[in-house]
Image (spheres, rainbow, N blue to C red):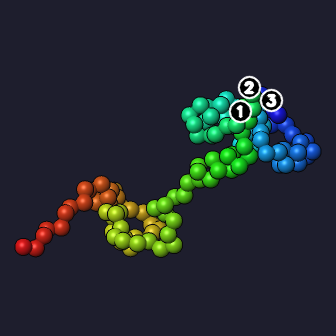
Amino acid sequence: MYQGGATLSTPEETFHDAKKLLWTLEETASQLSVHPRTVARLIEKGKLPVVRIGRAVRIEKQSVCHFIDQQRRYNEPCAGSAVQGESTCPISAKPVCTGGRHSSTQTARELDALLEPPTAKKQKS
């Protein structure tokens, strides 16, 4: 049951809900850990199908599972185990001495080098 931002359920209610085929709007919201109004919006947008029994609106447990599967997103560009292709980073790796103090001119030169826009390589004709 949803009560002002907190979902309260006993172990018996949880067991009973797991066996149910159809959930009310409030039960669905509780299962998804969202406000019932969010579930109502999903239904209005057609993203979550409903079963109508008379005036009662019920949501199939399987429909909720399917909705969750549809919402799953993976970070596709970073899903590989190794970097592939040419790096898009314009900064080349240079060995940097650490420790000691930098002179103000050395710091200024390094900053200028970092801020300088990358130049295009000349094409051979």
Of residues 26 and 80, the one nearer the viewer is 26
Q: Quadrant of residue 124?
A: bottom left
Residue found 58% across the figure and 40% down from its top: 47
Seen in the picture, residue 79 relative to 12 is either above or below; the reply is below
Task: Count residues near mark 1 (Cα–Cα under 10 Å), then give few for <14, some for 14-19, many for 20+.
Answer: few
Q: Which of the two labelled residues, at mark 3 and mark 1, occupies the earlier sequence position?
A: 3
Q: Is residue 15 visible?
A: yes
Marks 3 and 2 sit apart, C-alpha to C-alpha, by 24 Å
Disc 3 versus disc 2: nearer the observer: 2
Marks 1/2 in contact by CB < 8 Å: the verdict is yes
Work out whether 6 lies above or below 106.
above
**Where residue 59 appears, x then y in whole percent?**
71, 39
In what element is the residue under mark 2? loop
- The mark closer to the camera, 3 or 1, is 1
Could you tell me the amino acid type at mark 3? Gln
Quarter of the image for the N terminus: give it: top right
Residue 24, how many percent across, how many down? 77, 35
**Circle number at residue 3:** 3
Q: Tag 2: residue type?
A: Arg
Q: Looking at numbered disc 1 in the image, what kind of residue is underneath it?
A: Arg
Give the numbered dot on residue 52: 1
Q: CA distance from mark 3 to mark 1?
A: 25 Å
Decide which of 103, 92 is in the foreground and name it.
Answer: 92
Q: Residue at x 74, y 25 (%)?
A: 55
Q: Tag count in the figure?
A: 3
Q: Is residue 59 left or right of residue 10?
A: left
Residue designated by label 2: 55
Locate residue 73, reporting x and y percent: 55, 54
